[in-house]
């Protein structure tokens, strides 16, 4: 495509009513592409039936131009861009649903954001498992998903109040490596595992209800940890594929 043709298409291409755009943007930062965005997310669910496990995680879409909801994430390779919440099939890395983070909607910070995001992204599904990281995982989320016949497996931050009193880092640091401690409450299982010295991994699961230990290369690892490691990479794999097969081309634009 020549530069002249690209410039002409860019001038006339629009997904909204330009005359009403200013009034719409005041209440919705995504107004210029809102109709296209909603149709796309609907088609993602219609065209694909996911496997038994869904991964929910965040993705940074690298972008350095002007954007009212551009974020800075130093832990990501791109650092600047648009943040999106993604639900992907763990087995195939197919994107099932996503939400673009538009920033604060009010002066007060959003409470239980991770819980709200997961419930929104998997609202169309039932009878499956959801794998999340410690930003999303909580007791309330696990109970709400069970009501929808969805199980949860996810890492947990060590300062969460719903953890048992015996789940103290000070006590676990005294244990030898490959040691596991299980706590069972109703339909929830909490496991704490010591993969290496001075490191503790805490997981919550409503899918597993026993303390089964697997032996792997002379290491003892709980079945819950093994399942999490196998199912956590759906969004990361999708992000890697997007970067590998990118349609971006080198330009003189900064």
Image: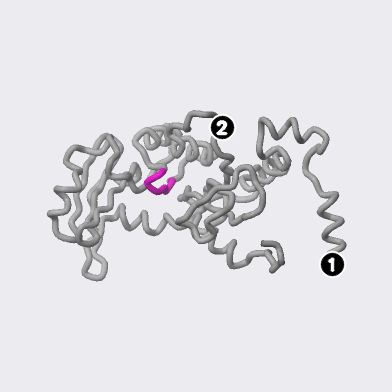
Residue lying at the far bottom in this picture: please name it.
Answer: 217
Task: Give me the C-alpha separation between circle 1 and circle 2.
Answer: 41 Å
In the picture, measured across the screen, residue 241 lies left or right of residue 15, that is: left
In the picture, measured across the screen, residue 40 lies left or right of residue 217, that is: right
The mark found on residue 105 in the picture is 2
Numbered-mark total = 2
Q: What element carries label 2?
A: loop
Check the picture and name the quadrant holding the C terminus.
bottom right
Q: What element carries label 1?
A: loop
In the picture, measured across the screen, residue 91 lies left or right of residue 161, that is: right
Q: Where is residue 202 in the image (x, y as percent from the top left)?
A: 28, 49
Q: Nearer the viewer, residue 228 or 137?
A: 137
Q: Residue at the spot x=20%, y=48% of the render?
A: 169
Contact, mark 1 vs mark 2 (Cβ under 8 Å): no
Check the picture and name the quadrant holding the N terminus.
bottom right
Quadrant in which residue 64 is drawn: bottom right
Q: Name the residue under label 1.
A: 2
Q: Residue at the spot x=65%, y=46% of the render?
A: 67
Query: Does 65 sit above or below residue 241?
Result: above
The mark found on residue 73 in the picture is none
Q: Residue at the spot x=19%, y=49% of the render?
A: 181
Residue 27 falls within the magenta-colored stretch: no
Q: Residue at the spot x=42%, y=36% of the render?
A: 145
Q: Position of residue 28 (x, y in %)?
A: 66, 34
Q: Where is residue 37 in the image (x, y as percent from the top left)?
A: 68, 43
Q: Which of 242 and 18 is in front in this view?
A: 18
Q: Nearer the viewer, residue 6 or 193?
A: 6
Bounds of the magenta segment = 130-135
Q: Position of residue 194 (x, y in %)?
A: 22, 57
Label 2: how many residues lie within 10 Å, few (<14), some (14-19) or many (20+)? few
């Amino acid at each position: 495509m020549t530069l002249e043709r690209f410039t002409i298409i860019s001038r006339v291409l629009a997904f909204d009513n330009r005359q009403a755009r200013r009034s719409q943007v005041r209440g919705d930062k995504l107004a210029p592409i809102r109709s296209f965005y909603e149709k796309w997310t609907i088609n993602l669910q219609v065209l694909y039936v996911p496997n038994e496990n869904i991964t929910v995680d965040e993705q940074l879409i690298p972008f350095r131009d002007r954007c009212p909801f551009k974020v800075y994430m130093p832990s990501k390779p791109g650092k600047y861009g648009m943040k999106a919440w993604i639900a992907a099939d763990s087995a195939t890395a197919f994107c099932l649903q996503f939400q673009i983070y538009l920033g604060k909607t009010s002066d007060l910070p959003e409470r239980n954001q991770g819980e709200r995001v997961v419930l929104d992204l998997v609202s169309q599904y039932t009878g499956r498992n959801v794998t999340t990281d410690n930003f999303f995982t909580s007791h309330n989320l696990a109970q709400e998903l069970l009501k929808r016949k969805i199980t949860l497996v996810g890492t947990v931050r060590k300062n969460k109040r719903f953890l048992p009193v015996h789940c103290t880092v000070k006590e676990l640091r005294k244990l030898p490596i490959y040691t596991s401690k299980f706590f069972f409450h109703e339909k929830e299982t909490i496991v704490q595992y010591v993969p290496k010295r001075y490191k503790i991994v805490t997981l919550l699961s409503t899918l597993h209800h026993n303390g089964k230990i697997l032996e792997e290369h002379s290491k003892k690892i709980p079945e819950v940890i093994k399942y999490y490691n196998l199912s956590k990479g759906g969004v990361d794999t999708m992000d890697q594929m997007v970067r590998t097969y990118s349609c971006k081309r080198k330009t003189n634009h900064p």
